[in-house]
Image (spheres, rainbow, N blue to C red):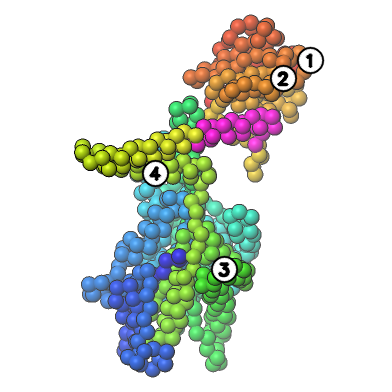
Amino acid sequence: SIRVAIRVRPFNAREAARGCRCCVEMEGNRVVLNNERDRGANEDGKRFFSFDHCYWSHDRSCDNYASQATVYNELGKFALDNAVSGYNVCLFAYGQTGSGKSYSMIGEEDEKGIVPRVVQDLFKYMESQKDENVAFEVVTSMTEIYKEKIFDLLNPSLSGRSNSDLRVREHPKHGPYIEGLTAMTANSYAEIERQLAFGYRARSVASTNMNDASSRAHTIFSIKFCQTSLEQLQTGFARETKKVSHINLVDLAGSERQSSRQLSGVEQARFKEGIAINKSLSALANCIFALYKQSQSNLKEKIHIPYRDSQLTWLLKESLGGNAKTIMLAAISPADINYEETLSTLQYASRAKRIKTNAIVNEDTNDRIIRELRAEIERLRRQVAGQQVPSPVSEADLEVQRLRQQLQESQKMIEQMNQHWNEERRSKQLSRSSMGGLSFSGNGLYIDDQMCPQLVNLNEDPLMTECLVYFLSPGLTIVGSEVEDVEGDNNSIPLVSQTIAPHHCRIQSEGGQVTIEPIEGALTFVNGRRIDEATLLRQGNRVMVGTSHIFRFNDP
Ligand SMILES: Nc1ncnc2c1ncn2[C@@H]1O[C@H](COP(=O)(O)OP(=O)(O)OP(=O)(O)O)[C@@H](O)[C@H]1O
């Protein structure tokens, strides 16, 4: 379920000057609203709401005062821990204008909020995991949805509102995304801090009755976090595991009451912004309501969730009802003059609590099974160790035996998984070689396997040169015109021409060395010299098989 937290701020200057009464109390994870004139409240004028977390930030002198660090330690750390485990996470701040959303998300110079703290701890995590077999990548982007238009806050050409708005598209697997959005790689916390400062300066902010610096748009700061680790297997292969998670930190524009009185020019502009903000927030409310209904319903039929009704809900689709662990931080004012807005925020948040998302670790399926089996083995090992106290009780012996058996079974499964993984990799390599070993990226052509030695074709036609890459996996590779039937674990390279024998030559790759040997004197040349025995290949050697297949040997 979506995790929901409520935070109440101190009185602002205006509320203090008007001598407002505090209408909010917090008891553990329960919020109590007080208003004797509220007809929906109980006879004591109270309404009760429970949430996953309640943060009392109204009065610093109270024992239960929740500081920026307290809020981060629960919400931000939860988001970060899940992102590190490979889940998509989304943390969004909701609430009336001036209720404290930006304060919680961004914070102030010496009271940093969730966003900078998440980034800081993300870099600390990467530092702590530094290892030559692990690589990390952090890519950030920052957008603003202002009056239903999407702007790129990290685009340096941004000047005023002239930056043309961007479009949302939908990826069949990963869901909606913004086309053409600037994505920046960051190598340090300081870099992201600069990006954040730049992006936040470019936001649409204006002074309103409720807040001197009110965000007039929704701001989304996104981090794509990739973790690639390389594991050396006993089989000689190196297994690459990749986990990618998307962290979306969303500071929503504040909901506000619309006035029907005569408005001045500036007020008119704020009023129009307010309409757009309320429109997208009500689209969000409608999605939350539909998702809430879906969670209540036992019906098989699916309820339509109106994600498409606003850019905001469309972009948050995966975070609300899809593949993400989502946290909603609802900020409220303590003042009685804002009672209605506070009540509506709490009702909104109560509904969100019931929404269930469907978060999964974003990694290769085989990686997931292997990871789960490893965890299982570890658990069983610990259990076996725990049970090994000498005991005459035969029941304990039986338990140890059962655990041992389970452990063996899990170990066997993991071996099979690794074997299966290797086979898959090999078959991918074979299909790559039969396709000419080509891989395409958006930027053109690249050879995506730098780990194996390779034979790269050379051709009189420069356009045809280096178009074919044969990857030489550890073990034996048979080259010939009829190699479909090569047995066991052996690999094959099929070549067709009159001068190629059915089984023409053997290429052995072992312990980092590769040799080539003709079979029954078949025509094979290394650097123009005919060979008749196993010959060691060196980086850059020219290899000719028959009279028309020429390659360069590449050993990365
Ligand atoms: N927990 C808090 N402790 C101290 N001051 C706070 C707290 N929360 C909010 N404030 C102060 O209240 C004012 C309004 O907060 P903030 O700008 O975060 O509201 P907001 O919900 O983001 O408003 P808007 O929707 O208009 O952008 C700011 O001056 C901020 O410093």
Say above or below: 228 vs 20: above
Measured in 3D between alpha carbons, the distance from the residue under mark 1 to the one under mark 3, in whole angstroms, is 63 Å
User: Is any atom of residue 71 visible in this view?
Assistant: yes
Answer with mark 4 or mark 1, whichever residue precedes in sequence.
4
Q: Which residue is mark 3?
A: 313
Viewer-side label of 3, 4: 4
Residue 191 painted magenta: no
Question: In the rendered structure, which amino acid carries the disc numbered 1?
Answer: Gln
Classify mark 1: helix, strand or loop: loop
Magenta span of residues: 417-439
Q: Which residue is mark 2?
A: 482
Residue closest to the eye, 19 or 553: 553
By secondary structure, the bulk of the magenta-drawn segment is best described as helix
Q: Which sits earlier in the primary sequence, circle 3 or circle 2?
A: 3
Query: Does the beta carbon of the residue at mark 1 sit less than 8 Å from ligand 1?
Result: no
* Alpha carbons under labels 1 and 2: distance apart: 12 Å
Reading the chain from its start, which is encountered first: label 3 or label 4? 3
Q: Are marks 1 and 3 in contact (CB under 8 Å)?
A: no
Q: Position of residue 123 (x, y in %)?
A: 39, 49
Mark pair 3, 4: CA separation? 37 Å
Label 4, label 1: how far apart the Cα atoms are = 55 Å
Q: Which residue is at a point 31% across and 42% down the rendered structure image?
A: 399
Q: Earlier in the sequence, mark 1 or mark 2?
A: 2
